[in-house]
Amino acid sequence: MAAQKAIASRQNREFIFDIVGGIEIFTGKDSVKGFMDNYILRLAEALYNIAWKLENKITFNIDDEKEYFLETYYRFSERFNVPDHLTKAYEQLMAASGESD
């Protein structure tokens, strides 16, 4: 299982590996090529998951999570070009919240 995760991590350009006693994170010329894309994907995943929680009436810590990840999204969008998949995640969260831009 660890070997499969390591292969998947490298193919996804994540360079985060499970090791005995924790995790190992590698940086450098290969990691730097993919870390921003991976960050954007994780942010989109967070927005989609919060939307899912709202749609399924799972409210434990939802306000704190929503506020945190929306603030992260807003700060990101002030500084960087927002890819379509992140915009769609944001729009789904807003729809699930009953809010509009």
Image: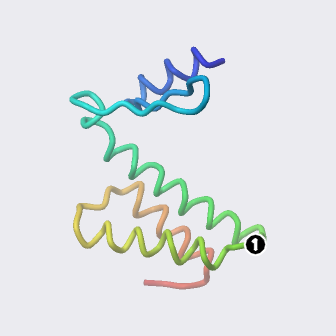
Q: Is 23 left or right of 77, judged from the image as shown?
A: right
Give the quadrant of residue 66: bottom right
Characterize the local packing of mark 1: few (<14), some (14-19) or many (20 or more) Cα atoms within 10 angstroms.
few
Residue 97 on image: x %, y % = 61, 79
Give the camera-side residue of 53 and 92. 53
Q: What residue type is labelled 1?
A: Phe
Rendered view: 76 above or below 14:
below
Q: Is 72 left or right of 5, judged from the image as shown?
A: left
Rendered view: 35 above or below 80:
above
Give the camera-side residue of 95 and 24. 24
Residue 41 on image: x %, y % = 44, 49
Q: Which residue lies furthest to the top in this view?
A: 3
Give the camera-side residue of 23 and 73. 23
> What element does badge 1 sit on?
loop
Q: What residue is shown at x 47% (from left), y 27% (from top)? A: 9
Q: Residue furthest front?
A: 21
Q: In what quadrant of the picture does the C terminus appear?
A: bottom left
Residue 77 on image: x %, y % = 30, 69
Q: What residue is shown at x 40% (from left), y 68% (from top)? A: 73
Residue 91 on image: x %, y % = 48, 70
Give the residue pinned by disc 1.
60
Q: In what quadrant of the picture does the N terminus appear?
A: top right
Q: State how many labels appear.
A: 1
Q: What residue is shown at x 55% (from left), y 58% (from top)? A: 46
